[in-house]
Amino acid sequence: MKRPKILIIYTGGTIGMIENPDTHALQPFNFDHLMDNVPKVKKLDYEIGNFQFNPPIDSSNMDPSHWRDIALTIEEKYDLYDGFVVLHGTDTMAFTASALSFMLENLSKPVIITGSQLPIGEVRTDGEENLITALQVAAAIDEKGRPRVQEVAILFENYLWRGNRATKMSADNFNAFKSFNYPQLAEIGLDIEYNTPYLRQVPPRPLKVCTDMDSNVMFLELNPGMTEQTLDYLLHTPGIKGIVLKTYGAGNTPTHPWFIKCIKKAVDRGVST
Ligand code: ASP
């Protein structure tokens, strides 16, 4: 059996942070610190490569240029590795997972994103287990030797979720992620139980990486207190090309004439809603 080859892309986040003794604030630390705290990784007997953000960042600072860096790293190393593990802060992990799932077209290898609620150096850390399980999922193959997971997924505590269906739902529970509209891809207990019918299966095609992202798209969540003045002002944001409206229920919006007028004026100016 050949040793699985996994690339760890370390972007930052709580998992690799240490406490500043003077301020007691958590600060990102380097990849070696991370690996020193998980000596058990050696027991997996995998060939592990790494790529680290320099400096590692808190995921609140993630933006599309970082997604591009991750996607291009995966593209560059795609043929050299069996799978990829991305270490990332939890706060924007679901955004990155979703963006990567669209950037990495024809992906047929695992891209497993994980992090932790407690830094890896803490006694009760969840980081060690998350990292080890993420590596195992990234290395897992089926009876025909194909990767079990051929998509971007978030691994956190007891579950593996589809990347573009997951959301962070807790700032302190170890099971920090959930998908409200897609079942878990795997459940992590004594064994890793894959939910095979729900895993993406793709015919082998060359990976195509799309890194063009347009940030001139606004996400607008409706709320009952929204006024005509606020809405009109937001819809006049300079350079805006499109707006994604987060509406109520099954897609309902207010029917007030002022609301419809504001949206119509934006559409007439060429803004897509
Ligand atoms: N603030 C941190 C981040 O998102 C939280 C975490 O890593 O879980 O990078």
Image (cartoon, helix red, strand yellow):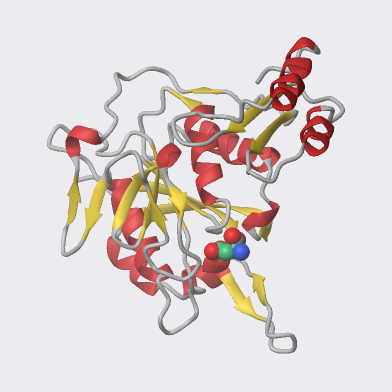
Residue at the location (46% across, 63% down)?
A: 170
Judge by depth and name the residue closer to the eye, 29 or 264: 264
Image-based side of 159 in relation to 73, left or right? left
In this picture, residue 201 sits left or right of residue 33:
left
- Measuring from the top left, give residue 86's x and y in whole percent: 49, 50
Depicted 118 relative to depicted 136: above or below: below
Residue that extends furthest to the left in the rendered view of this protein: 143
Number of numbered markers: 0
* Residue 220 in the image, given as x and y percentages of width and height: 66, 36
Which sits in the foreground, 242 or 26? 242
- Residue 214: image quadrant is top right
The quadrant in which the C terminus is found is: top right
Query: Residue extending furthest right?
Result: 238
Question: What residue is at 36 percent from the left and 55 percent from the top?
Answer: 134
Ligand 1 lies in quarter: bottom right
Q: Residue at x 87, y 28 (%)?
A: 238
- Describe residue 240's horizontal placement relative to residue 93 as left or right: right
Q: Is residue 233 above or below residue 62?
A: above
102, above or below 125, in the image: above
| 215 lies above or below 272 | below
Q: Quadrant of residue 67?
A: top right
Residue 6: where, in percent of width, then height?
40, 48
In the drawing, does residue 268 fall left or right of residue 30? Answer: right
Instruction: Say if residue 4 shows up in the picture.
Output: no
**Taking the image as drawn, is residue 118 in sight?**
yes
Q: Nearer the viewer, residue 123 or 83?
A: 123
* Nearer to us in this view, 123 or 269: 269
Q: Which residue is the extreme one toward the bottom?
A: 22
Q: Residue at x 59, y 34 (%)?
A: 72
Q: Position of residue 181 (x, y in %)?
A: 34, 39
